[in-house]
Image (tube, grey):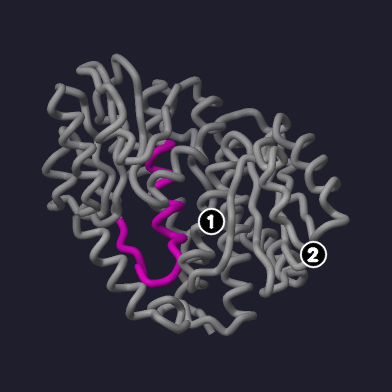
Amino acid sequence: MNEMMRREIEAQATLLPELQPQLAEAADRLPRATGRVMAGGCGDSAFAPQALQDVFRALGVDVEAKTSMEIAAFTTLKETDTVLLSSISGGTKRTVEAANAARAVGAEVVAITCNGESALAAAASQTIVLPFAPLSRKTPHSLDYAVTLLALAEIARGLAGLDRNVFSCDASDLQQRLATSEERARGLAATFDPSGKLVLLGAGCDLGTANYAAAKFHEAGGLLAVSAETENFIHGMNFMLEPDDTLIALASTNAAEPRARTVAEAFSGICRTHLVRETDEDPSPAGAFRRLLAQTFTMQLLCLAIADQLALRLEEPRAGRDNAAAHSEAQRQAMSF
């Protein structure tokens, strides 16, 4: 039913290996950072640097994940800062504001966008043009998010001075990871009750993936999904759980797994709970990136599976649900300022 979203998800397996050398070359042309490094944007572009925290740690590079509004209005920027700002369109207003705020103090600003002629590119001191075109911007975003992840990982690798082949990948390997993720997603979707909430938990980098996953369900017709830090969830948020809810605890690191398992087990008597654990323990940056992709693929395919189960038309505004025009107009008004 939602073939466009499936095409975007499946395209990741072939496109990421093709783009990796180009993004690595572009990243290596950037100047080395001399001070703090921040990365952010709005929506998925804010979630991506959160989700990459384990990759950054494995590279030995500190990258602060922030939203565009945090950077533009609530961060004391310095001339020595390097600010990485992502926007597929290059026209996101708060992200352009963040670029202008950083440039105003003399900071280095790197735009990551598909549009080299955009307002964001014009505001930045350096631009990496993502060498692809999204197949669709109407379905919950998948392909463009994965490319953004790869671009940010390559920039961090370049800042660390590591070899260009660190994140090289093979299409057949990614296709196998997609197949494994689809099997897992179907199992999760089979227990989902549409009358309940979906609660997605993560710690560290997995919180970024949980935030991204919740956003996919919001984009898929406004489905009720909540993301939270695994530890913080049990300090009161847990009281919102009802028997028809589904709780998924993500764990892609050894540090996150024990708490995720404990929380999933503790609430299994209240609602449906699942632990989504990555067992690859390769400590290298490439290993961390593979784990991130596996979790990302699973969440994308879970969203697709549930949308298909509910017969949501993902290329239509609000997936064909009631009040779509009113929602679209309210969003347009809010994003125009």
Q: Secondary structure at mark 1?
A: helix
Report the front residue among 125 and 275. 275
| Residue 20 is a magenta residue | no
Report the front residue among 196 and 296. 196
Residue located at (12% from left, 27% from top): 104
Which residue is disc 1 drawn over?
171
Q: Secondary structure at mark 2?
A: loop
**Amino acid tagged 1:** Ala
Quadrant assignment for the C terminus:
bottom left
Relative to residue 315, is residue 129 depicted above or below? above
**Residue that sits furthest to the right in the current view:** 269
Magenta residues span 132-153
**Amino acid tagged 2:** Pro
Report the front residue among 120 and 279. 120
**On the picture, is 112 further left or further right than 274?**
left
Q: Residues within 10 Å of mark 2 (few under 14, many from 20)?
A: few
**Image x and y of residue 305, in percent:** 63, 73
| Residue 142 is a magenta residue | yes
**Image x and y of residue 31, in percent:** 24, 24
Q: Residues within 10 Å of mark 1 (few under 14, many from 20)?
A: some
Which residue is disc 2 drawn over?
243
Q: Nearer the viewer, mark 2 or mark 1?
A: 2
Residue located at (25% from left, 57% from top): 89
Relative to residue 109, is residue 312 depicted above or below? below
**Image x and y of residue 154, in percent:** 40, 36
Residue 73 quadrant: top left
